Image (cartoon, rainbow, N blue to C red):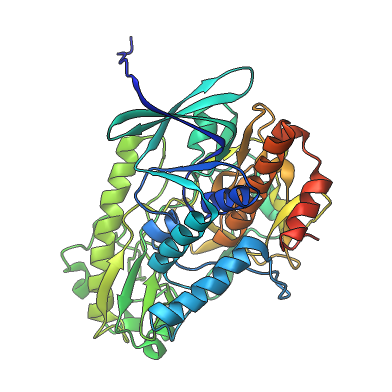
Amino acid sequence: MQDKLTLFIKENYQADICVAGGGVAGCSAALAAARKGKKVILCEKEGCLGGAAVLGCVAPLGSKETRDGRSFGGILEELVVKLEQWNRKYANADGNTIINPHLLQLLLMKELQDAGVKLLFHVELCQCQMCEEKIQKAFFLSGQGILAVEAEIFIDATGDGALFAAAGADYVTGSEENVFEQLFEADYNKIHYEKEESLTSYGEPGAVQPASAMFLMGGVDIAKGEKYCNRLLTYEDLGITKEEFMALPYAGSSGFEKNENLIPLPQGRILFYLGTRKGEVVVNMSRVLQVDVENTQAVSEAERVTQLQVLYLTDFLKRFVPGFENAYFMECSVSLGIRESRRLKGKKVLKGLDAIRCKTGREDIAYASYMIDIHDPYGKRKAIGGDLKGACFGVPYDCLVSGQLKNLLVCGRCISVDHIAHASTRIQGTCIQTGQAAGTAAAVCSEEKTGVGEINVASLRKILRSDKMLIL
């Protein structure tokens, strides 16, 4: 028998469109809909915009253009251009000028304010009220109690699919049963280190990519440090002994367990990206396996482990890695970086083989150009997959539609794709594109009083093209 608790609605809101989630996909969706003259409410559980890009310090903004150099345009290109301008103006950027989590946060705030989007911060989705295959109201828990938002169209941009799960839509989590067969058929059953080796097994279905906590360091001698980046290192590579490493207070803790002759690091290697200014880097080296976002205790434990890994990795880099001798810690993520969790089981599920082979078509409303990059769900193998076999692949409109709910659209990380395709579509540039497509489609459906599954995709593509998105 479950305990029951009766709560009263403290405040009611109404809008044409409600966007749940203020990450880059949700902001793009809200911006696109508001620019079409719609009343938009965006609900975000934290106190800022940007989601994982900001809270998780996931600074690299990939999939901005096709592999042959054509910009994906639209809101994505706007944000890239403005972030670069702001970086030079406000942050004295002389390094990677499209990396700066907290300037992105402020840029998104300014853009949404200018578009007239109403923002509700510190509100977390807890339930939905349904009526005839529609979400009638979404309920959010706030410091003052329960808030209700009523809208014509709802957009799930939560990353973890919290809204479509609460509304009862079908979804999947992690890898499918045939995932290895697809990788094998495409000859992508490869583990990428300095050299490739074949992957002979994958494990049980339902595997999710690892979660991480990224962090920033300054004072790095990039030229010296780059020699050790993205490599599996032995003790000899850094001129230390196994005994010297194992004497460290964190040796043997989660992620630092013995790993034969390799230095035991959580991700198995040193990995960093160039930061905003010279000498600054974004470090991506922590790793926790099989985090279930529907289990609060599991997520809490992963937060504890990854944040301590950041501390230990900072110590390791400064102690042993050339180029980091005079480096200093700047900041780290304040929220766990989830790569994979729930994905909508939509009207169409984009398959990994179609992504690898760069299939495009007349139903596409967004594109992806990032490699198939499956961070090993089971251990410290670097990554599984490889580069796409063309310029980009398309994301059909039906990947944003559940087929069960007449007024729900999905964008960002939790769209309807399989485990393999998701390893590319999860990248921020594609998330921003699916956000713009979802927001535009929501505005059209609101204007025409139609269900999200009834939209004329050819007309939607024409609108997206007129809004300067690349539509092939």
- Would residue 410 be visible to someone looking at this image? yes
The spot of residue 14 in percent (x, y) is 51, 32
Residue at 69% in and 47% down: 181
Q: Looking at this view, is 70 or 8 the one in front?
A: 8
Residue that sits furthest to the top in the current view? 1
> Looking at the figure, which quarter contains the N terminus?
top left
Residue at 49% in and 51% down: 209
How many marks the image carries: the answer is: 0
Q: Looking at this view, is 124 or 235 the one in front?
A: 124
The spot of residue 108 in percent (x, y) is 47, 60
Viewed as shown, does residue 250 lie left or right of 3? left
> Looking at the figure, which quarter contains the C terminus?
bottom right
Viewed as shown, does residue 282 lie left or right of 371? left
Q: As displayed, is residue 375 above or below residue 45?
A: below
Q: As displayed, is residue 357 above or below residue 226?
A: above
Q: Looking at this view, is 13 or 62 the one in front?
A: 13
- Would residue 357 be visible to someone looking at this image? no
The spot of residue 366 in percent (x, y) is 70, 55
The spot of residue 170 in percent (x, y) is 60, 29
Q: As displayed, is residue 256 above or below residue 88?
A: above
Residue at 33% in and 19% down: 8
